[in-house]
Image (tube, grey):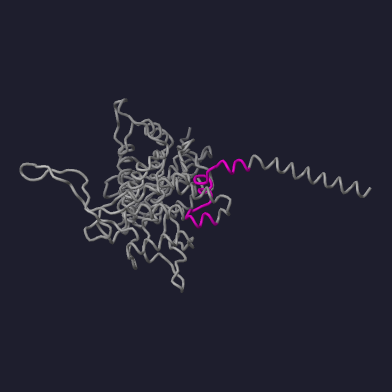
C-alpha cells in the first residue's frame, strides 16, 4: 500500500481536506498563518527574538486571503526590526496603560482615586498576568457572587471569616464591572506601536445593537427619596444657624467659643475659640429649589456665569459641563434672580471668582462634601429625619416631579439631564395629587359621555 502524501489543502489519495497554512518571509523573519482544524479559525505564529520563543495569536476569522496579507505585513515588520505578534494583552498590562494615559485626564479627584482602587481590585481578583482574551462568563458571575456576599473587599482582598463579611449592594458591584468594561473598550482604540491593546472586549455585547449576554446586577427596589416642600421650608428656616469658618476680617465674622483646649507644658485648659460666620447653606438651598441643578454644579458657579441684559438685570445662568453634558445657558426665574443678587452683594464677586468660595482658598469653590455636612447639620437643627438614600438629590427629584406635567424635553434642558429616559425613570416620582387625577379621570370621561348622549337624545326628540 502506497503511503499518503499530504499537499496543501488535500491528500492525494483520498482527497480529504487538511489544515491550510501559509508562510511569509524567510527564517527568522518568517510569519506563518494556519488552521488548527480544516475550515476553522486561523492562527498566526512567529519567532520573537526578545522572548526567544515562538509566539502565537488567534486571528479570529477564517479569511485566508486576509491572513496572507497579514502574514506578509508582519514579516515585513520583522525584517525592519520591529516585534511581530506581541504577547497577548494581560489584565495588569491593560490596567497600567489606562491608569497611565486615561485616568490623569479625569477632572474629579474622586474619579481618579476610584480608578486606582478598582484597578487594584481587579488585579487581585483576576491576576495581573491573566490574559484578557480568556475571560468569560465564569469570572463574571463568580465576581458578582463573591463581591455581593462581602467575600471580596473594595480593593480585592479576600475576607476569610464569615462574621467579618459585609454584603455589598448591586449598584456598587455593577460600578466595579462597568469600570473594567470601560477599560477594555478604551483599550480597543488605544494603540501601542501601531497596534490596539485589545482586539476584542470579552465582556462587551457581541455586536452593536445586540443585547449583552452577561446581565449586570440591578437593584429591584432602588432608594430614590423625594423631598417635600414642607421639608424644604423647615430646613431653610434652620439654615441661617449653620456656621462656617471665617477670617477675622470677613464680614459677619464673630469670635465664638466652640469648646475647650489644653495648651502649655502643664496642659492647662482654656477656651477654644474660632471666627465663624453664617454658611452658604441658605443660598444653596434656594438655588437647588429654584433650578433643580446638581449641588456640584451649584457649588462651582462663578460670577462670570451670570448673564445680564443691557439694563443690567440678571437674565440667565451659564452651567458648566456635568455628566458629559455640553455647556448650557438657561434663563432664570425672578426668585433665582433675587437669590443671585443677594449672593453678589454679600461677596462682591467679579469675574472668574466662585460665588461660594472656600475658606482655605478663596480662589476655589467649596466642595460638595462641605455643602452636604451643612445640610445634615441643618436637618438636625430643624429636627427633620435624614432621608435614607440621598442628601441633595431628593430636592432635585422634587424639582423634576413638580414639573412632570410640562414638556419633558424642556424640563430635561432646564434641569441639566442628559436624556429623557433617566429623567422619567429616576427623578419623576408619583404624588397623591396626580394619582387622584388619574383614577378620577375615567369617571369624568363617563360623565362627559353621558352628558353628550343626553344632549343628543334631547335634540333628536325636538326634531321629531
Q: Residue furthest right?
A: 464
- Decide if residue 328 is on the left or right side of residue 269: right
Q: Residue furthest left?
A: 265
Spot occupied by residue 351 in the image (x, y as percentages of width and height):
34, 68
Q: Give the number of callouts.
A: 0
- Which secondary structure class fits the magenta region best? helix
- Using the rendered view, name the quadrant where residue 55 is placed: top left
Q: Is residue 309 left or right of residue 275?
A: right
Farthest bottom residue? 310
Residue 401: in sight, yes or no? Answer: yes
- Residue 134 visible? The answer is no
> In terms of depth relative to the viewer, which is nearer, 232 or 87?
232
Residue sitting nearer the eye, 105 or 269: 269
Residue placed furthest toward the top: 162
Per the rendered image, the range of residues in magenta is 410-437
Determine whether, in the image, residue 259 is placed left or right of residue 446: left
Q: Position of residue 276 (x, y in %)?
A: 25, 53
Q: Could you say where residue 306 lies in the image, as x and y percent from the top left? A: 41, 65
Give above or below for 437 relative to 412: above
| Residue 212 among magenta residues | no
Q: Is residue 165 above or below residue 239?
A: above
Residue 64 appears at what percent x and percent y? 48, 49
Residue 420 colored magenta? yes
Left or right: 414 in relation to 44: right
Amino acid at each position: 500500500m502506497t503511503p499518503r502524501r499530504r499537499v496543501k489543502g488535500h491528500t492525494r489519495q483520498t482527497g480529504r481536506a487538511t489544515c491550510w497554512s501559509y508562510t511569509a518571509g524567510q527564517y527568522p523573519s518568517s510569519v506563518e498563518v494556519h488552521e488548527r482544524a480544516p475550515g476553522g479559525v486561523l492562527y498566526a505564529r512567529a519567532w520573537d527574538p526578545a522572548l526567544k520563543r515562538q509566539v502565537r495569536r488567534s486571528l479570529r476569522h477564517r479569511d485566508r486571503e486576509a491572513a496572507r496579507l497579514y502574514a506578509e505585513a508582519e514579516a515585513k515588520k520583522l525584517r525592519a526590526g520591529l516585534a511581530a505578534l506581541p504577547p497577548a494583552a494581560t489584565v495588569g498590562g491593560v490596567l497600567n496603560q489606562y491608569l497611565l494615559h486615561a485616568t490623569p485626564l479625569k477632572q474629579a479627584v474622586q474619579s481618579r482615586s476610584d480608578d486606582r482602587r478598582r484597578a487594584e481590585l481587579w488585579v487581585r481578583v483576576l491576576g495581573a498576568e491573566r490574559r484578557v482574551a480568556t475571560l468569560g462568563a465564569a469570572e463574571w458571575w463568580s465576581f458578582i457572587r463573591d463581591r455581593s456576599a462581602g467575600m471580596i473587599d473594595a480593593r480585592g482582598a479576600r475576607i476569610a471569616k464569615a462574621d467579618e463579611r459585609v454584603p455589598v449592594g448591586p449598584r456598587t458591584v455593577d460600578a466595579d464591572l462597568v469600570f473594567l468594561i470601560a477599560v477594555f473598550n478604551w483599550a480597543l482604540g488605544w494603540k501601542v506601536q501601531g497596534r490596539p491593546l485589545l482586539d476584542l472586549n470579552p465582556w462587551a455585547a457581541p455586536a452593536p445593537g445586540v443585547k449583552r449576554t452577561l446581565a449586570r446586577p440591578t437593584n429591584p427596589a432602588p432608594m430614590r427619596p423625594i423631598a417635600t416642600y414642607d421639608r424644604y421650608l423647615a430646613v431653610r428656616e434652620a439654615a441661617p444657624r449653620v456656621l462656617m469658618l471665617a477670617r477675622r476680617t470677613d464680614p459677619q465674622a464673630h469670635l465664638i467659643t466652640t469648646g475647650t483646649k489644653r495648651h502649655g507644658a502643664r496642659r492647662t485648659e482654656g477656651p477654644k475659640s474660632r471666627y465663624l460666620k453664617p454658611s452658604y447653606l441658605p443660598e444653596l438651598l434656594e438655588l437647588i429649589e429654584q433650578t433643580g441643578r446638581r449641588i456640584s454644579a451649584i457649588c462651582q458657579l462663578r460670577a462670570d456665569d451670570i448673564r445680564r441684559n443691557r439694563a443690567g438685570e440678571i437674565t440667565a445662568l451659564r452651567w458648566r459641563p456635568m455628566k458629559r453634558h455640553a455647556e448650557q445657558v438657561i434663563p432664570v426665574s425672578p426668585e433665582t434672580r433675587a437669590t443671585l443678587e443677594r449672593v453678589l452683594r454679600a461677596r462682591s464677586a467679579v469675574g472668574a471668582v466662585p460665588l461660594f468660595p472656600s475658606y482655605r482658598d478663596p480662589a476655589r469653590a467649596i466642595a460638595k462634601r462641605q455643602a452636604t455636612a451643612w445640610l445634615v447639620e441643618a436637618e438636625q437643627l430643624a429636627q427633620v429625619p435624614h432621608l435614607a438614600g440621598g442628601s441633595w438629590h431628593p430636592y432635585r427629584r422634587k424639582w423634576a416631579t413638580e414639573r412632570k406635567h410640562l414638556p419633558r424635553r424642556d424640563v430635561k434642558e432646564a434641569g441639566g439631564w442628559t436624556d429623557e429616559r433617566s429623567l422619567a425613570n429616576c427623578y419623576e416620582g408619583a404624588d397623591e395629587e396626580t394619582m387622584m387625577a388619574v383614577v378620577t379621570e375615567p369617571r369624568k370621561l363617563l360623565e362627559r359621555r353621558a352628558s353628550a348622549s343626553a344632549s343628543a337624545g334631547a335634540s333628536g326628540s325636538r326634531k321629531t
